[in-house]
């Protein structure tokens, strides 16, 4: 376990924190190698061996892998066939989202009992606002005791970073994983993050890193010293956000965790309809739009439901349980199946609706185990276009415009 408190006596001249940021104390908790840790908790025979979690087919992708497998070069989102070549002795396990969700719920309950203000960022990642607690106990010591308590009650390993905001706390956690704990105090922020690669900034992906690299920006210190106007011209609104993060500025508050129950989309008709091809096309578009919202907000669904309202006022609903997902192809198939079973009365419809429930936090890559790497890249490209130009800018040809 790595324990550290990053402290510098001399304030960096380029610091530009507001008083509120100087007084905040934000804790970032990340459960190390979460999928692997859950699998090992369920089966002790998996301890200490190379373990890869993902799809069974060669064209599927790696969802997670143990540190033993990483020593062979295996990484998340890598094609499974390539991962197996790198580490032929690895044990391959299919993803068990029900297991991971169960452990995530347990962790949430444990933390909510102890933490005054908790935000759940993903299945295995949490933020806590400990501002003001220094009056009663040292926040770093208290965070260490919290980590020990959670570890003993859950059996899952974790790392944490404590600093003045979410960005710095998350960077600190990532730098000291696994089993690390670190505090970066206010006057240590710039000396701590300056030497790091810009890739360490949350939100900087491959495309942004490549663009910054082309103009010679590879270190956070270089990014922090660039004119903000130039970054805005180069990256738009994201340029200002990255400049702030590079200067240790992040006013995003810790938001109290509330379990999201479901998301829904409905379409009422001006004229009642019985046009089945048109209805199927409409359901495709609605599902595609709702699935994008899942991915954008970081949710996975396990229950798909279709609801119909007839012209006589009657309602009908049918739902099915699926493996956690937010992929268009999977959800569109389920919605079509439910509609075909549900719509048997052949009466005119006044409204159709779709809802996704049984939601858990998760990045959308982790549910595409049966998809190949090309499909994964396609989802990423489509979501990038939608994010930049709007949800309706790109869509499947079989759908209709809402």
Image (cartoon, grey):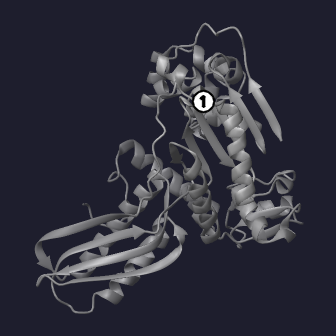
Reply above or below: 185 against 260: above
Residue 224 shows in the view: yes
Residue that label 1 marks: 136
The answer to which image quadrant residue 245 occupies is: top right
Q: Residue at 47% x, 50% y: name it.
A: 257
Residue occupying the far bottom of the picture: 345
The answer to which image quadrant residue 339 occupies is: bottom left
Q: Considering the numbered disc 1 on the image, is that residue within a helix, a strand or a loop?
A: loop
Q: Residue at 79% x, 60% y: name it.
A: 83
Reply above or below: 280 against 366: below
Q: Residues within 10 Å of mark 1 (few under 14, many from 20)?
A: few
Q: Position of residue 231 (x, y in %)?
A: 49, 22
Q: Position of residue 249 (x, y in %)?
A: 53, 23
Does 37 sit left or right of 68 as displayed? left
Q: Residue at 17% x, 84% y: name it.
A: 314
Q: Residue at 56% x, 15% y: name it.
A: 226
Pick whichever, 145 or 379, lies toward us: 145
Pick whichever, 211 or 138, lies toward us: 138
Reply above or below: 334 against 393: below
* Quarter that holds the C terminus: bottom left
Does 277 sit left or right of 160 as displayed? left
Reply above or below: 13 against 155: above
Q: Position of residue 399 (x, y in %)?
A: 32, 67
Residue 79 shows in the view: no
* Quarter that holds the N terminus: top right
Residue occupying the far front of the picture: 136
């Amino acid at each position: 376990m790595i324990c550290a408190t990053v402290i510098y006596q001399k304030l960096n001249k380029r610091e530009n924190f507001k008083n509120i940021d100087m007084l905040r104390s934000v804790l970032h908790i990340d459960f190390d190698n979460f999928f692997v840790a859950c699998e090992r908790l369920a089966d002790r025979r998996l301890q200490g061996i190379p373990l890869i979690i993902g799809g069974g087919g060669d064209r599927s992708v790696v969802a997670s892998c143990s540190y033993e497998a990483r020593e062979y070069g295996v990484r998340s989102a890598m094609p499974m066939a390539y991962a197996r070549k790198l580490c032929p002795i690895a044990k391959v396990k299919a993803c068990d989202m029900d297991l991971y969700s169960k452990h995530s719920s347990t962790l949430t309950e444990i933390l909510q009992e102890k933490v005054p203000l908790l935000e759940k960022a993903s299945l295995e990642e949490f933020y806590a606002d400990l501002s003001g607690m220094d009056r009663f106990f040292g926040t770093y010591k208290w965070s260490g005791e919290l980590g020990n308590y959670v570890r003993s009650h859950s059996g899952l390993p974790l790392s944490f970073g404590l600093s003045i905001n979410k960005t710095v706390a998350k960077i600190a956690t990532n730098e000291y994983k696994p089993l690390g704990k670190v505090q970066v105090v206010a006057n240590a922020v710039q000396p701590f993050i300056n030497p790091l690669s810009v890739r360490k900034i949350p939100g900087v992906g491959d495309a942004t890193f490549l663009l910054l690299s082309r103009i010679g920006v590879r270190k956070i210190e270089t990014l922090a010293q660039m004119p903000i106007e130039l970054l805005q011209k180069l990256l738009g609104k994201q340029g200002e956000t990255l400049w702030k993060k590079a200067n240790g500025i992040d006013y995003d508050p810790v938001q109290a965790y509330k379990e999201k129950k479901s998301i829904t989309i409905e379409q009422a008709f001006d004229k009642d309809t019985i046009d089945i091809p048109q209805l199927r096309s409409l359901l495709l578009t609605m599902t595609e739009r709702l699935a994008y919202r899942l991915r954008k907000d970081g949710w996975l669904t396990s229950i798909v439901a279709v609801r119909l309202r007839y012209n006589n006022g009657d309602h009908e609903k049918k739902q099915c349980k699926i493996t956690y997902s937010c992929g268009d192809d999977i959800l569109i198939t389920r919605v079509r199946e439910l509609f075909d079973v549900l719509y048997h009365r052949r009466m005119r419809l006044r409204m159709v609706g779709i809802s996704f429930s049984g939601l858990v936090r998760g990045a959308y890559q982790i549910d595409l185990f049966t998809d190949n790497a090309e499909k994964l890249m396609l989802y990423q490209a489509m979501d990038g276009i939608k994010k930049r130009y709007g949800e309706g800018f790109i869509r499947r040809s079989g759908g209709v415009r809402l």
